[in-house]
Amino acid sequence: MNQLTEENWDIEITPKNNLFSLGLKDVWQYRDLLVLLVRRDFVSFYKQTILGPIWFFVQPIITILIYNLVFNNLANIGTDKIPGPVFYLAGTILWNYFADCLTKTSTVFRDNAAMLGKVYFPRLIMPLSIVLSNLIRFAVQFILFVLLMLVYHFYGSPIRPNIYILLFPLLIILIAALGLGLGMIISAVTTKYRDLAFVVSFGVPLLMYTTTVIYPLSATIIKYPAYSWLIKFNPVTAVIETFRYGFLNKGSFCWELLAYSSCITIIILLTGIVIFNRVEKNFVDTV
């Protein structure tokens, strides 16, 4: 007579019942894969380029020079008495991080359909790898921002960081969570409607003009009062304004606006998690 014995498994794959479950325990077990995906994103993007990672510096430098020429010199849009390059770089590095997380996460199912359909691993690893790989790029550009800020401070510009600089980790979490949440929502829709990917590709750059990347919030309230509410209640605006206020001691800061941005980000992230968990079960049938 065979005696039944209890079997213990290291990993048990079961359908998710809780839509709000992130499966962080599974993600931690596959942390080596997460590291490999981050490395793949970094290497594959710059492997066949001449300048390589130097593009981390070249892209924002060219961008802020164009912004300074067009918006500061030609359009005469003020920068709250902050040197133009520092002002524009502060908003650009944050916006680029948000935009990269959003656009790349929005096509995560389509871009990785072959691998996702053959091998099991926690699907959340794919969007998380995008957020982390873009965080490396942001870290390098943030170093450029700090160096530029020190140069202007050395030459006598009134740049004085204040106590609100301590909110910096919270701001990075908010901007990453907002890009991740919106990206997961759009990725779920693009599995059935590919046209949305084209809307995102040209829509995200246009959305930049509804934030304070190229102009201060105070200027929009004074010059464009009819449209200032659109910019003020964009959740990215509070992050950029708080970042500038903490590091440059110029601009506007409002706890209520930052709290509003945090609440919107949490709602979008939770919505993205629910939709992502629903779609990941059968996305292979629609991609």
Image (cartoon, grey):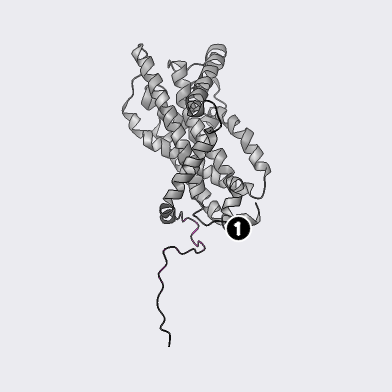
Q: Amino acid at mark 1?
A: Asn
User: What's drawn in magenta, residue-wise?
Assistant: 7-21
Q: Is residue 137 left or right of residue 167?
A: right
Residue at image coords 38%, 24%: 146
Please state the horizontal and vertical placement of residue 20, each as a whole percent of the image. 48, 55
Q: Give above or below for 146 relative to 72.
A: below
Any magenta on residue 14?
yes
Mark 1 surroundings: few (<14), some (14-19) or many (≥20) residues within 10 A: few
Please state the horizontal and vertical placement of residue 43, each as a whole percent of the image. 50, 37
Residue at image coords 44%, 53%: 30
Please state the horizontal and vertical placement of residue 163, each as a whole percent of the image. 31, 28
Instruction: Identify the image quadrant of residue 155.
Output: top left
Pick whichever, 237 or 97, lies toward us: 97
Pick whichever, 162 or 219, lies toward us: 162
Please state the horizontal and vertical placement of residue 262, each as a whole percent of the image. 44, 40
Pick whichever, 1 or 144, lies toward us: 1
Can see residue 152?
yes
Q: Is residue 74 left or right of residue 31?
A: right
Q: Give above or below for 183 relative to 82.
A: below
Which secondary structure is most common in the magenta stretch? loop
Q: Which residue is mark 1?
A: 282
Residue at image coords 40%, 31%: 254
Any magenta on residue 264?
no
Can see residue 259?
no
Question: Dot 1 lies on which element?
Answer: loop
